[in-house]
Image (cartoon, rainbow, N blue to C red):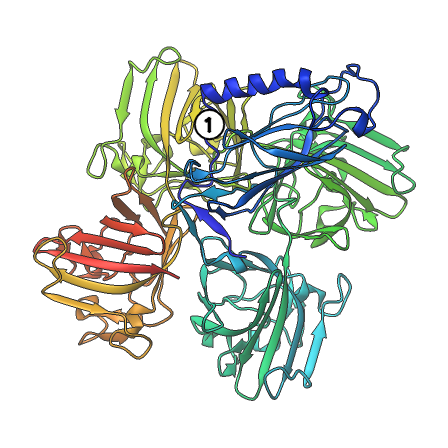
């Protein structure tokens, strides 16, 4: 089944006044529920109704299908509660659904008609237990699944591969399918080459690819760091340090990885050979896809003397991806016994509050990170305190290293890969408790006792007994996911008063346009990132300019540090955790304005004044007054992914390509080295050109005497990652970052380059059309217009 992407950014619409009324009406229906013909309290074998003081909770809510539905299709909502409930009242697209089931498990269904509103299918669930306790009405799924109705729903061909995969088998032999020369299977932790089989191969929804290996993988002598095959630190360029993309051609049954060092299985195995030196690594590798069924993938590659075959399984992510917070920790002599010591979270003023507010992030890309907000529980063995207390996090358990995670649902284990990654207490590892940070292992494995909805319990045997940790998912009640940009900023003496100073987005060429084109990325997995390109608004306190101006971003406010966000709808707050993460102006923090980058706090909290659909207003008290920021969500879905050029033409007027035009005629056609380039629009707002070591190069670039296929030339060689921004109305597409380009590198706004040194920091294209997997853009270069047509790979 193919994954679906939606032009509506997979967002649930805000509940309107009429829908609030609907919810109130639904609540009133509960008084009649036991009398209706659906089913009765008696049929559910429940106790005589009396309020028990504990409202029920829906632990699981999922939608099927998770994708496009058409007229006549049935939408199904699966519901699971933490206790027995009466038949819930479910409305799908404002029409009552049919409900069946019993006790704690219910299913609601409704057939789509020709009168459905286009876009994401909405729903509401109202419910109560037999005692009369009413649960909180629900209108979102617990796993992110979404059904979409109508032409605005578009399929994304990346779906079959999206996710994290790990190797289960590798073999080699003289012919395709023959692995008689050598073969090996995953033996689990402690198995042969376990440092290899725990590697993760990440296929992003936006077409990106990444090797995630932790601190250790299988390394061989040809890589120059070991004398014998063994587990050792990954070696560049096969260490995942370079960006890469993937292209899956279902018709040709091929999977191409483009990006120096990207690979599946063994890094040495390439098309037609085995590497003898890392310096010989090609820009791309193509595998034959033997089988891709569900979560099982088999690929094969001819390396000359024979064939290597690699089999992989997709790692289930959905249940655990996101942010988690500890709510209980206990230890005892046996599994499930916490009689030696236990402690529960009692809030921000409770014992060890600095520990219970830590965040454990399981990112959707398979990475893991501890976020501690500048303070956590520290113990004497860590060498910085003389007694247990709240203190500054201590390396390597301070979250400074990004690790990885692997959840084995079948085996019931959760492994963290990366020195210093941990759950609960940092000292507790498999079979021991640490007495020195230097002894920290490279991975820790926990037994998963329970993973149900937003509740996670893990256990670890440390030798004398067992530690048990229970976590709650940090659930953001509103959907902030996506890229946002600033529309307005103002400051004044009181909340809502911007009389001291205010400024609005004036577009490219407007005042502070380098600031207003910045993107603020809120990931679905809880991550936050500032995406600024090569330039943003910089001020003298940051130490690199003498006057306020557009300049290179300054650390730590340059997006170089990982960060997360937490939105508390009840409190009306948005908290960013991660050194240098901010919205609006970097200098503005809670209660002050920074005088030096060195004073940057680990967290900043904003008041959420308004969050309705794609409009967000934030406010922050900096002491003398209040800054207010207004932002709009940038529509991403139509552009995100990998694109390839299919047509280029130029002429004297918009839409006229009479001067020159050329189309893609395949791998042996003219300029094939240009038409196979990949233009990658990342889901996080990043952009990169991938050219595979060979592209169309012209004399103005200084490396050739005549136009022809040759090595890409900086800064148009894709070596720098840029950013992208789709205009509010969808009629402009801006690339931010020197060298980022679509079509021909020489064509910029108002000119054609005559020297790479004159390359501008951004280029903006007019969007003629984006329909499904086809995109056409145009650019005025002065004498006329270039027009490019692309198809999504």
Pick whichever, 178 or 215, lies toward us.
178
Picture quarter with the N terminus = bottom right
- The percent coordinates of residue 239 (x first, y second) are 54, 63
- The percent coordinates of residue 127 (x first, y second) are 66, 24
The answer to whether residue 555 is visible is: no
Q: Tell me if residue 608 comes above or below residue 178 in the rendering.
A: above
- The percent coordinates of residue 48 (x first, y second) are 83, 18
Image quadrant where residue 383 sits: top right
- The percent coordinates of residue 296 (x first, y second) are 63, 64
Q: Tell me if residue 218 comes above or below residue 459 in the rendering.
A: below
Pick whichever, 60 or 331, lies toward us.
60
Question: Residue at coordinates 45% horizontally, 54% vertically from top-left?
Answer: 156
From the image, tell me which residue sits under label 1. 14
Q: Tell me if residue 566 comes above or below residue 305 in the rendering.
A: above
Please tell me whether mark 1 sits on a helix, a strand or a loop: loop
Q: How many marks?
A: 1
Pick whichever, 392 or 190, lies toward us.
190
The answer to whether residue 704 is visible is: yes
Q: Residues within 10 Å of mark 1 (few under 14, many from 20)?
A: some
Q: Tell me if residue 16 comes above or below residue 514 in the rendering.
A: above
Q: Residue furthest front?
A: 37
């Amino acid at each position: 089944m193919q994954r679906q992407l939606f032009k509506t950014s997979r967002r649930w619409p805000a509940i309107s006044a009429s829908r609030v009324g609907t919810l109130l009406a639904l609540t009133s229906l509960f008084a009649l529920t036991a009398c209706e013909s659906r089913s009765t309290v008696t049929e559910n074998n429940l106790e005589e109704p009396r309020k028990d003081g504990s409202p029920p909770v829906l632990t699981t809510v999922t939608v099927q299908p998770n994708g496009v539905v058409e007229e006549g299709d049935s939408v199904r909502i699966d519901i699971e509660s933490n206790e027995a409930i009466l038949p819930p009242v479910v409305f799908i697209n404002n029409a009552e659904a049919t409900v069946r089931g019993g006790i704690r498990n219910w299913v609601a269904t409704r057939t789509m008609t020709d009168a459905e509103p286009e876009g994401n299918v909405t729903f509401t669930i109202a419910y109560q237990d037999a005692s009369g306790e009413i649960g909180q009405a629900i209108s979102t799924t617990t796993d992110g699944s979404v059904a979409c109705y109508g032409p605005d729903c578009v399929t994304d061909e990346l779906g079959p591969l999206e996710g994290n995969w790990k190797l289960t088998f590798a073999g080699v032999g003289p012919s395709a399918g023959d692995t008689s020369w050598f073969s090996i299977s995953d033996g689990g932790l402690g198995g042969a080459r376990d440092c290899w089989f725990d590697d993760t191969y990440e296929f992003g929804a936006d077409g990106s690819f990444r090797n995630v290996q932790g601190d250790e993988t299988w390394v061989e002598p040809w890589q120059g760091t070991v004398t014998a095959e063994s587990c050792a630190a990954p070696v560049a360029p096969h260490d995942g340090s370079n960006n890469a993309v993937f292209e899956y051609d279902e018709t040709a049954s091929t999977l191409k990885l483009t990006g120096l060092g990207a690979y599946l299985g063994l890094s040495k195995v390439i098309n037609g050979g085995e590497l003898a030196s890392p310096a010989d690594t090609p820009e791309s590798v193509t595998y034959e896809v033997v089988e891709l069924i569900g979560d099982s993938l088999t690929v094969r590659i001819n390396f000359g003397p024979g064939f290597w075959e690699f089999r992989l399984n997709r790692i289930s992510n959905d249940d655990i991806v996101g942010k988690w917070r500890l709510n209980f920790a206990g230890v005892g002599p046996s599994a499930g016994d916490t009689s030696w010591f236990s402690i529960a979270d009692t809030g921000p003023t409770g014992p060890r509050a600095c520990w219970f507010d830590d965040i454990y992030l399981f990112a959707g890309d398979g990475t893991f990170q501890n976020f501690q907000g500048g303070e956590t529980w520290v113990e004497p063995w860590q060498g910085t305190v003389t007694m247990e207390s709240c203190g500054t996090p201590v390396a390597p358990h301070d979250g400074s290293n990004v690790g990885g995670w692997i959840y084995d649902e079948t085996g019931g284990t959760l492994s963290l890969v990366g020195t210093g990654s941990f759950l609960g207490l940092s000292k507790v590892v498999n079979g021991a408790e640490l007495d020195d940070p230097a002894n920290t292992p490279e991975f820790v494995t926990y037994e998963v006792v329970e993973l149900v909805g937003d509740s996670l319990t893990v256990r670890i045997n440390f030798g004398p007994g067992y530690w048990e940790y229970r976590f709650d998912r940090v659930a953001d009640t509103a959907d902030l996911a996506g890229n946002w940009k600033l529309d307005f900023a103002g400051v004044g003496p009181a909340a809502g008063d911007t009389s001291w100073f205010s400024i609005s987005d004036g577009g490219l060429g407007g005042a502070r346009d380098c600031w207003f084109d910045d993107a603020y990325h809120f990931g679905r997995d809880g991550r936050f990132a500032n995406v600024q390109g090569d330039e943003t608004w910089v001020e003298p306190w940051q130490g690199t300019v003498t006057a306020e101006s557009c300049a290179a971003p300054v650390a730590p406010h340059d997006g170089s540090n990982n960060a997360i966000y937490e939105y508390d709808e009840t409190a009306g707050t948005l908290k960013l955790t991660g050194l240098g993460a901010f919205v609006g102006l970097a200098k503005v923090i809670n209660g002050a304005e920074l005088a030096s980058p060195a004073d940057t706090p680990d967290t900043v909290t904003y008041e959420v004044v308004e969050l309705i659909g794609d409009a967000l207003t934030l406010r922050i008290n900096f002491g003398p007054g209040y800054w207010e920021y207004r932002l709009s969500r940038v529509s991403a879905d139509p552009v995100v992914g990998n694109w390839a050029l299919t047509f280029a033409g130029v002429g004297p007027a918009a839409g006229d390509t009479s001067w020159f035009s050329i189309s893609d005629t395949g791998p042996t056609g003219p300029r094939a080295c240009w038409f196979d380039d990949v233009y990658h629009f990342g889901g996080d707002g990043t952009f990169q050109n991938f050219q595979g070591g060979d592209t169309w190069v012209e004399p103005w670039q200084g490396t050739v005497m005549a136009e022809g296929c040759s090595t890409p030339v900086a800064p148009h060689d894709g070596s720098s990652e840029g950013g992208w921004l789709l205009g509010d109305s969808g009629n402009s597409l801006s690339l931010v970052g020197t060298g980022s380009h679509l079509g021909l590198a020489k064509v910029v706004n108002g000119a054609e380059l005559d020297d790479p040194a004159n390359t501008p920091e951004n280029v903006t294209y007019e969007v003629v059309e984006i329909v499904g997997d086809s995109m056409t853009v145009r650019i005025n270069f002065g004498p006329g217009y270039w027009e490019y047509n692309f198809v999504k790979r």
